[in-house]
Image: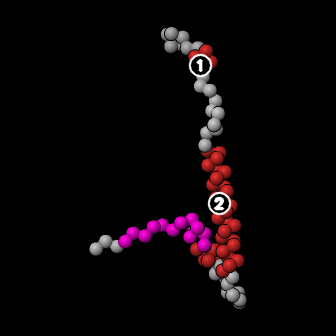
Amino acid sequence: MDEPTSQPPTLEEQVYQALGEASVCWSLTPPGVFDSEKVKGIAQTLLAAIEADKAQAVAAAVPSANPAPKAKKADTPFIGRNGG
């Protein structure tokens, strides 16, 4: 029987996982309680910044509503009938 294929994690899941992993990157574990609500806010801020950057990149990549007109024959360089 085939095993179910798992979907790759979403960007949101990856951000939360990365923040969780980063929280334990201390040479000595600091005392205290992990504030998951604060981390959630950090993740939401980071994801909003990613979405804004992505939207800006898409807007820059989309051709403008008024593209430059195509060149007319009179606008193109003259090419002689014998190739030169």
- Please state which amino acid type lies under the numbered disc 1: Lys
* Residue occupying image coordinates x 54% and y 11%: 80
Q: Quadrant of the N terminus?
A: bottom left
Query: Where are the magenta residues, as a range?
Result: 4-16
Above or below for 68 versus 11 = above
Q: Nearer the viewer, residue 65 or 57?
A: 65
Disc 1 to disc 2, how far (Cα)? 42 Å
Q: Looking at the rendering, which quadrant does residue 31 occupy?
A: bottom right
Answer left or right for 16 relative to 32.
left
Q: Is residue 31 magenta?
A: no
- Residue 50 shows which numbered tag? 2
Residue 52 in picture, x, y percent from top left: 67, 56
Q: Position of residue 64 (x, y in %)?
A: 64, 38
Q: Residue shown at 64%/33% (left/top)? A: 66
Give left or right: position of 27 versus 13: right
Residue 77 appears in view: no
Q: Which residue is mark 1?
A: 72
Secondary element at tag 2 = helix
Q: Nearer the viewer, residue 9 or 18?
A: 9
Q: Are marks 1 and 2 in contact (CB under 8 Å)?
A: no
Q: Residue furthest front?
A: 65
The vertical placement of 84 against 33, above or below, is: above
**Position above or below: 7 against 34:** above
Q: Amino acid at mark 2?
A: Ile
In terms of sequence position, does the residue under pointer 1 or pointer 2 come before the other? 2
Q: Which image quarter: residue 74?
A: top right
Q: Position of residue 32 (x, y in %)?
A: 71, 89
Q: Residue at x 31, y 71 (%)?
A: 2
Q: Is disc 2 surrounded by few (<14), some (14 to 19) or many (20+) residues within 10 Å?
A: few
Can you give x and y, in whole percent of width and height, for residue 62 in the image? Answer: 61, 43
**Res 11 quadrant in image:** bottom right
Residue 8 falls within the magenta-colored stretch: yes
